[in-house]
Image (cartoon, rainbow, N blue to C red):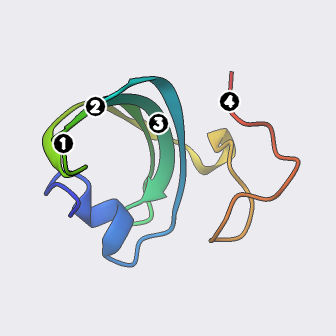
Amino acid sequence: MPSARLTPPLTAGFAAHLIKEIWAFDTDRIAVRFVYEWHDDSGQWHRSHGNENWAFDADGLMTHRYASINDQPIAQSERLFHWPLGRRPDGRAPWPE
C-alpha cells in the first residue's frame, strides 16, 4: 500500500512517470532509488527523487519501509520523461544522469 506521501501523484489520477531501480540488496533487505515527474491539479509540474529502504520477514512480508523524498517544482520545459503514460519504452536510458 502506498504511503500517504505517495498517494496524490501516483494514485489520484495525476500524470506521473516513475523510474525505480534497485540500488542494493541482501537476503532480507532492498534499497532502491527513484525519480518521478508529476503534476498537481493546478498543472504545476514537480520532480520527486530519493531513496527507499525495505526490510522483509522470513515470509517475504515487508516489515519496515524508510523513504527520503525530495520534491522540486519544475517548469514543463524542464521535464525529462516524455513518453505516454504507462510502461517506460524499451531502449529508454535507465536513469536520468
Q: CA distance from mark 1 to mark 4?
A: 35 Å
| Residue type indicated by callout 4 | Pro
As drawn, is 72 to the left or to the right of 59?
right
Determine which residue is flagged by label 2. 28
Q: Position of residue 78 (x, y in %)?
A: 64, 39
Q: Which residue: 25% across, 49% down?
A: 60
Q: Position of residue 42 (x, y in %)?
A: 36, 67
- The mark nearer the N terminus, 1 or 3, is 3
Q: Quadrant of residue 17?
A: bottom right
Is 69 left, or right, of 80 in this rendering?
left
Q: Nearer the viewer, mark 1 or mark 4?
A: 1
**Residue 34 shows which numbered tag?**
3
Given residues 23 and 79, the one toward you in this image is 23
Label 1 and label 3: CA atoms lie apart by: 26 Å
Q: What residue is rendered at 37% in x and 64% in y? A: 10
Give the labeled residue for mark 4.
Answer: 96
